[in-house]
Image: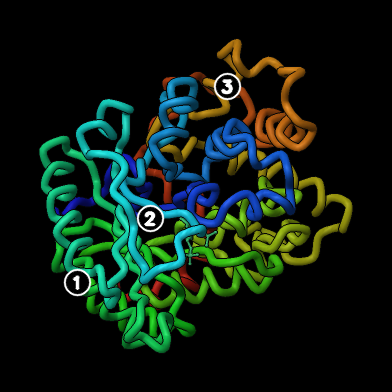
C-alpha cells in the first residue's frame, strides 16, 4: 500500500464505488428486478452522481462504454472474475492486465482474492503480478478480499473479515473491499488490522432503505472509508434517491434515519438563528438553505458531472434508452446541481467539509479513530 491522502477513486479520503461486474459474477438474474439495468449505459449514467467516486466493471464493459464517460466518471477495471456457472472451489480467472486497464483509462484496478480457497496460492501469485503492474501505471489497487472455500465455515465472522483486511494490507492493496462483519466493533477491528489502508464495505444483496443505510452507517462508525455497492443501488426503482442518501451517510456523516429517502425535510438545520418559526416560513427557508448548501461548491474531484452533462450533446434524450434510464438521467440532470456557477468552480476545494452543518460535524466528531 502506498499511503495517500486521496486518489482519483476517493473523495475526502472516502470511496463510494458503484460495482457493476454482476453480469459476470451472478449472471442476468441480478438485472431482473430492474430490467433496464442490463444496459451498461444506464449504470454509467448513474455513476455520474456526485456521490459515486468510481464505477467498477469488467474490461468488456469498459471498452464499450467508458469512452463516452471518461470525463465524468472514475473507473476501476476488474482484472479477474468468474461466472456463477463455475461450480468448483472458489477461484477467479485473470481476464485483463493492469497495462490494458491503464490503456482503457482506468484510475484503479480491482482484484478478487478468495483467501482460504484451495486456489489461494495461485490467486495470490496472480495478484502480486497485477499489483506490481498497477504500481507501474500509477493506478490504485482495490482488493475484493473475500475469504471463502472448503475450510471456511463463515466468511463474515469478525475474525475472518479482520484477516481479510490484514491480508489485503500485507499483499499491497490500497483499498480492501470486505463483507460487513456484523457490527461496528467488528468493523473497527477489521479497520485496525488494515493499518492506514482503507477498508470499504461490500453492499450485499438488496435490503430495505433504512436497514441498508443503518448498515452503512455502522460500517462508517467502525472506521470503514465508504462502500462498494451494486445491487443495493441498481436494483432499486429509484437509485438516485439511495445515492443521495448514501452521499449523506458516507461523506457528510448524517445518520441513516436522517438520510433515508423521503425524510430529507428532517435534515438538521438547527444552526438557524431561530427556534420556533412559522411552519410555512420554515419550510421555505429550509428549501432555500438546502439549495444554497448544494450550490456553494461542487464536491467532486473531477469537474462537476452535471455541468459536463448540460454542456455535452450526448446528454440529449436518446429515444433508444429504456424508460428507467431516461428517468434517472432526467433526475440527475434536473434535480441536483443547479447551473448557478461556472465549470471552473467545480473543482474540489478545501471548503468542502463546510457542507456539513456544524451540529452534524460536532455530533460525529468523536466517533472515528481514523
Ligand atoms: P453487491 O453490492 O451487489 O454485493 O456487489 C459487490 C460485489 O463484490 C460485486 O462486485 C460482485 O459482483 C459481487 O459482490 C460478488 O458477490 P458474491 O461473490 O458474494 O456473490
Mark before the other along the chain sequence, 3 or 1: 1
- Residue at image mark 1: 195
Percent of width and height locating residue 162: 29, 80
Q: CA distance from mark 3 to mark 1?
A: 39 Å
The secondary structure type at the circle numbered 3 is helix
State whether residue 115 is above or below residue 305: below
Q: CA distance from mark 3 to mark 2?
A: 24 Å
Mark before the other along the chain sequence, 1 or 2: 2
Q: CA distance from mark 1 to mark 2?
A: 16 Å
Contact, CB < 8 Å: mark 1 with mark 2? no
Residue 263 got which mark?
A: none
Image quarter of the C terminus: bottom left
Quarter of the view holding residue 53: top left
Q: Residue at x 41, y 54 (%)?
A: 82
Percent of width and height locating residue 94: 28, 48
Percent of width and height locating residue 115: 27, 73
State whether residue 224 is above or below residue 342: below
Q: Residues within 10 Å of mark 3 (few under 14, many from 20)?
A: many
State whether residue 119 is above or below residue 154: above
Residue 309 got which mark?
A: 3
Q: Residues within 10 Å of mark 2 (few under 14, many from 20)?
A: many
- Residue at image mark 2: 14
Percent of width and height locating residue 1: 15, 57
Q: Residue at x 35, y 61 (%)?
A: 144
Left-right relation of 344 to 137: right
Q: Residues within 10 Å of mark 1 (few under 14, many from 20)?
A: some
Quarter of the view holding residue 172: bottom left
The residue lying furthest to the top in this view is 313
Amino acid at each position: 500500500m502506498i499511503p495517500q491522502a486521496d486518489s482519483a477513486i476517493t473523495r475526502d479520503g472516502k470511496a463510494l464505488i458503484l460495482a457493476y461486474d454482476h453480469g459476470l459474477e451472478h449472471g442476468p438474474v441480478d438485472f431482473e428486478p430492474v430490467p433496464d439495468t442490463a444496459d451498461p449505459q444506464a449504470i454509467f449514467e448513474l455513476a455520474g452522481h456526485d456521490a459515486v467516486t468510481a464505477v467498477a466493471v469488467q474490461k468488456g464493459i469498459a471498452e464499450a462504454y467508458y469512452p463516452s464517460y471518461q470525463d465524468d466518471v472514475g473507473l476501476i477495471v476488474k482484472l479477474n472474475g468468474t461466472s456463477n456457472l463455475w461450480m468448483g472451489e472458489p477461484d477467479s480467472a485473470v481476464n485483463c492486465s493492469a497495462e490494458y486497464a491503464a490503456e482503457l483509462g482506468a484510475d484503479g484496478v480491482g482484484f478478487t482474492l478468495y483467501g482460504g480457497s484451495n486456489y489461494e496460492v495461485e490467486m495470490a501469485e496472480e495478484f502480486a503480478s497485477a499489483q506490481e503492474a498497477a504500481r507501474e501505471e500509477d493506478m490504485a489497487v482495490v482488493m475484493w478480499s473475500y475469504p471463502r472455500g472448503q475450510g471456511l465455515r463463515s466468511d463474515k465472522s469478525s475474525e475472518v473479515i479482520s484477516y481479510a483486511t490484514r491480508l489485503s494490507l500485507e499483499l499491497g492493496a490500497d483499498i480492501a473491499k470486505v463483507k460487513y462483519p456484523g457490527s461496528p466493533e467488528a468493523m473497527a477491528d477489521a479497520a485496525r488490522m488494515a493499518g492506514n489502508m482503507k477498508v470499504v464495505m461490500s453492499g450485499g444483496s438488496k435490503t430495505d432503505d433504512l436497514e441498508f443505510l443503518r448498515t452503512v452507517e455502522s460500517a462508517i462508525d467502525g472506521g470503514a472509508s465508504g462502500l462498494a455497492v451494486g445491487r443495493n443501488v441498481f436494483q432499486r426503482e429509484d437509485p438516485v434517491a439511495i445515492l443521495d442518501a448514501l452521499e449523506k451517510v458516507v461523506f457528510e456523516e448524517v445518520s441513516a434515519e436522517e438520510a433515508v429517502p423521503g425524510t430529507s425535510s428532517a435534515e438538521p438545520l438547527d444552526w438557524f438563528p431561530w427556534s420556533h418559526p412559522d411552519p410555512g416560513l420554515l419550510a421555505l427557508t429550509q428549501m432555500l438553505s438546502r439549495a444554497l448548501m448544494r450550490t456553494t461548491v461542487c464536491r467532486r474531484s473531477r469537474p462537476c458531472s452535471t455541468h459536463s452533462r448540460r454542456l455535452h450533446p450526448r446528454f440529449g434524450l436518446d429515444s433508444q434508452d429504456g424508460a428507467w434510464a431516461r428517468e434517472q438521467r432526467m433526475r440527475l440532470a434536473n434535480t441536483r446541481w443547479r447551473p448557478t456557477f461556472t465549470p471552473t468552480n467545480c473543482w474540489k476545494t478545501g471548503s468542502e467539509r463546510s457542507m456539513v452543518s456544524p451540529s452534524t460535524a460536532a455530533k460525529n466528531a468523536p466517533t472515528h479513530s481514523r
